[in-house]
Image (cartoon, helix red, strand yellow):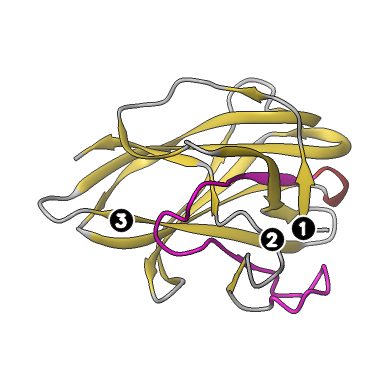
Amino acid sequence: LLSFAVVSTLALSASAQLYDQTAGITTSGVISAYMTDNDTLVQSADDFTVPAGGNWDVTSVTVHGFRNGTGANMTDMTVEIYNDASGPGTIVYTEAITLAGAGVPAPNNDTAIVLTLATTQSLAPGTYWLSVYGNTEAASRWNWTTHGAVAQGAVAMLQDAEDYFGAGATTWTSVQALGLTDPDFTFQIGGTG
């Protein structure tokens, strides 16, 4: 229930890249959505590291994902950045971002979505966790496309606090512990560093 397959990829441009985890993109994905019609959040996250030597000023995040089912266009997404605590720890940034144009229809194949932050986020060297989720109804939820190469950093995680899918992942849980084979999600971080 947590993983779905897609067929093609459409890429869009992003700001200067500080981090790139797009090599090895797959045709599968994992739900990462706030389901507006039943007030339920099933949230995915993946880690990245700001190397020693200086801060990153993050201005954008680009994620790959797709929607299944049918429903209204997805017009906004939420970006969250967490400190590392062997998984997402304390939240350091959160923002709901309105998507450009008419948003993302459902269903749709894998699409790169550029999310420009309203406020530049300065991150000191260290490990962080990125969570991005679509705000849409359950039948046409957003799925974050996976990265099937060797894991970069820790294996991605999922949290289903209300156990909507019945997998028992009510706290942050490794996607591989849930039976998924792909270790990471596909994303880029833009800005200056």
Among the two numbered marks 3 and 2 on one chain, the one whose residue lies closer to the N terminus? 3
Residue plotted at (58% across, 35% down): 98
Please tell me whether residue 46 is drawn above or below residue 66 in the rendered image.
below
Residue lying farthest left?
A: 53
Crowding around mark 3 (Cα neighbors within 10 Å: few <14, some 14 to 19, many 20+) is: some
Mark 3 or 2: in front is 2
Secondary structure under the numbered disc 2 in the rendered image: loop
Q: Specify whether residue 105 is in view.
A: no
Secondary structure under the numbered disc 1 in the rendered image: loop
Instruction: Tell me, yes or no, whether the two marked residues, 3 and 2, touch with CB atoms within 8 Å.
Output: no
Secondary structure under the numbered disc 3 in the rendered image: strand
Instruction: Tell me, yes or no, whether the two marked residues, 1 and 2, touch with CB atoms within 8 Å.
Output: yes
Crowding around mark 2 (Cα neighbors within 10 Å: few <14, some 14 to 19, many 20+) is: some
Q: Position of residue 5 (x, y in %)?
A: 78, 41
What residue is shown with label 1? 2
Residue plotted at (83% across, 74% down): 166
Q: CA distance from mark 3 to mark 1?
A: 26 Å
Q: Position of residue 8 (x, y in %)?
A: 70, 25
User: Of the numbered discs in the image, which one, if any, rests on residue 49?
Assistant: 3
The magenta segment is 141-169
**Which quadrant of the structure image shows residue 159?**
bottom right
What residue is shown with label 2? 180
- The three-letter amino acid code for the residue at tag 2 is Leu
Magenta segment's dominant SS is loop
- The three-letter amino acid code for the residue at tag 3 is Thr
Q: Specify whether residue 40 is in view.
A: yes
Please tell me whether residue 107 is drawn above or below residue 180 in the rendered image.
above
